[in-house]
Image (cartoon, rainbow, N blue to C red):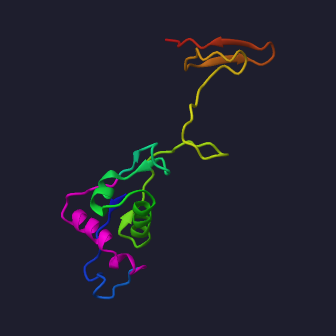
Amino acid sequence: MSAEKIPPGETPESGGDLPSTTIWKNEKAMKLVAEMMAGRIIEIKPQLDFATELGFSYPVAEQILETKGEEVASILESMVSSGILKKDFFDKILSCPVCQSLSLRPGTHCPKCSSGNIARGRILEHLICNCLKERIASS
C-alpha cells in the first residue's frame, strides 16, 4: 500500500469530499498518516508470518499503530476506502481450502511415475505416436 497525496483544501476540518470521515477520527491512523507525510514511510508492505492467523503481518504499520493482526488490516483497509492509501498486489498465499491452514508443502511431480526429479524445459509431442522428446535449441 502506498500513500497518495490529499489535494489542497481536502482535509477533515474543511469538510472536503472525502468518502469516509471516521478514519480521520482514528488517532492511530492519523499517526500513520503523519509518518507518511513526513516521508518516513513510503510503502507499507506485508511480510509472511505463519505464526499469525492471517499468515502475514505489516511490521511497519504495527509498530506505528501499536496493534497487530486483524486490527491493523482493518485500519489499512479503511485508509484504502478513504483514498488515503492505494492498494497494490503483493503476493499470493496458498491455504488449505478445508481448514485454511497455511502449513502447506506444494510440490511438483511427474503425473505418471510421481517422481519429483523434474526440470523445466520444452518438450515436443507427436500426438499420433505419443513420442515425447526434449526440444533441442537450433542454431
Q: Residue at x 80, y 12 (%)?
A: 129
Q: Residue at x 31, y 83 (%)?
A: 12
Query: How many numbered marks are there?
Result: 0
Image quadrant of residue 77? bottom left
Q: Is residue 128 magenta?
A: no
In the figure, 121 relative to 38: above or below?
above
In the figure, 77 relative to 9: above or below?
above
Q: Of all residues shown, which one is farthest toward the right?
A: 128
Q: Residue at x 26, y 83 (%)?
A: 9
Along the horizontal axis of the image, is 89 left or right of 44? Answer: right
Along the horizontal axis of the image, is 109 left or right of 29? Answer: right
> Residue 130 appears at what percent x and percent y?
77, 14
> Residue 117 appears at what percent x and percent y?
58, 14
Q: Is residue 30 magenta?
A: yes
The residue range painted magenta reads 19-44
Image quadrant of residue 36? bottom left
Instruction: Pick the residue in front: 82 or 4.
Output: 82
Along the horizontal axis of the image, is 115 left or right of 26? Answer: right
Instruction: Pick the residue in front: 139 or 34.
Output: 34
In the figure, 135 relative to 93: above or below?
above
Image quadrant of residue 132? top right
In the figure, 132 relative to 102: above or below?
above
Instruction: Pick the residue in front: 72 or 111.
Output: 72
Q: Residue at x 18, y 64 (%)?
A: 38
Which quarter of the figure is the N terminus placed in?
Answer: bottom left
